[in-house]
Amino acid sequence: MLRVWRASGQELAALSMEELSNVKALKRQLRALHGFPVCAQQLLHEDRLLENDAKLTAPLDLQLVLQPISATQIPDANTELVLYAALGGHVAVARFLLGASFTLDVEGALVLASESGHTEFAHLMLEAGADKDCRDNGGRTALIRASLAGQLEAVQLLLEAGAEKDTQDSEQRTALHCASDRGHVEIARLLLEAGADRHLKGRYGMTALTCASDRGYIEVVHLLLDAGDDKDVKARDYVTALTRASEKGHVEMIRSLLGRVTDADKDFKYRYGLMTALICAADKGHADTVRVLLKAGADKGLQDPVKKELRCYGDTALIHASAKGHCEVLRLLLEAGMDVDVRDRDDRTALMHASDEGHVEIVRLLLEAGASKDLKSSYLDQTALSCASDKGHGAVVQLLLGAETEKSFPARCTDSMLSL
């Protein structure tokens, strides 16, 4: 058995030797029991100072002496404050360390404590003079990290302390961006009530709304949409949310949003390539989303504009689905009566795109729907047959030539048609 005493005669611990490998392990035990920082502890055996790596091999009676933090111990004290006390919320250890006559890294401790949800510890760091808007190496403030981690009480503490709500990190994200991206609806509500700007744009133009729409967090989306009063802004925001949700295939969110988007706005074109919700869903192969949008009356004939830097060439939803090989989406669009021979700005049809990509079943579906295999792109001087031939898609070439045999082609797509 190992016993540790103070000079006053107070017994601090009686520990089994099996629990301890060396003096540093013992100091950590004493820290856990009494809040004494490891860097402040000195252990003596018969008036001899024990080094941290000294082995504890026999029953011992040791004396603990607590020393003030010296200048040479500042690095160790900072490590203990930030990586142990802040992460674990060990207030007693922090109080001891803060009693040193040297300035310690209270900002680093504030950021980690906020992220970890140790509100009492974070409050202590603020009282010790930590800058409420201090940043980590990624430019993230304590408020941003607490919002990202879903620490509601820490967010409330920082807002009450006057933390800046709209600070952007190195990726241009605010606390509201982070809360919205992670679906932390109560934190997003708190930030909005505190006056956070929901329209600030981060990297790639992402707002808090587009973050939540991307992730499928419908409660956060509705919270953000309901936060504004400007009708024109709200209409634009609804369309943005609808289009992002369609691109990601968040069907339930789409159903909810469609009830709040006017018929005039439903086909409004989205900023990234100015693609409509229907085109986005068709491009990604989200059949259920396409089905919902078609039932809601989305204009199936709209084309995206020509923006070559964004790889947009005037394609319709049908052309996108055909080029990407999305069989079920194509069936839905054909059943909805889309023009099978509509052309993009390169004068190419859906059949030309599918032939160029070698999508045998898509080509078959288009031909069965009446697509003309003889049409030619005047701009590129191509037909569906020349597209397939140039790329070496033999099965498509045979199909276009009318030489189909059962063994020449893969089985048809068997995507099931889900009812609404």
Image (cartoon, rainbow, N blue to C red):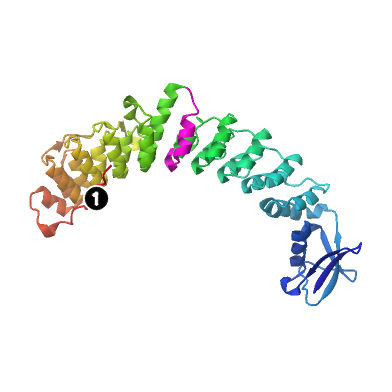
Q: Residue reaching furthest right?
A: 8
The residue that appears at 88% across and 63% down in the rendered structure is 10
**Nearest to the observer: residue 139 or residue 92:** 92
Q: Which residues are magenta?
A: 213-229
| Residue 171 in view, yes or no | no
Of helix, strand and loop, which mostly describes the magenta segment?
Answer: helix
**Nearest to the observer: residue 273 or residue 329:** 329
Q: Is residue 138 left or right of residue 70?
A: left
- Residue type at mark 1 is Ser
Q: Which percent across, then down, holds residue 11?
A: 85, 65
Residue on which disc 1 sits: 416
Q: Which percent across, then down, holds residue 273?
A: 35, 34
Q: Which percent across, then down, holds residue 381?
A: 16, 38
Q: Quadrant of residue 244?
A: top left
Q: Is residue 49 above or below residue 127?
A: below
Crowding around mark 1 (Cα neighbors within 10 Å: few <14, some 14 to 19, many 20+) is few
Q: Residue reaching furthest left?
A: 402
Q: Is residue 14 left or right of residue 149?
A: right
Q: Residue reaching furthest front?
A: 420
Q: Is residue 350 above or below residue 29?
A: above
Q: Which percent across, then down, holds residue 195?
A: 58, 29
Q: Is residue 185 left or right of residue 313?
A: right
Assess whether residue 297 is covered by the magenta stretch: no
Quarter of the figure with the C terminus: top left
Assess whether residue 215 is covered by the magenta stretch: yes
Quarter of the figure with the N terminus: bottom right
Q: Secondary structure at mark 1?
A: loop
Q: Is residue 205 left or right of residue 266?
A: right
Q: Quadrant of residue 313?
A: top left
The residue that appears at 58% across and 30% down in the rendered structure is 193
How many labels were placed on the picture? 1
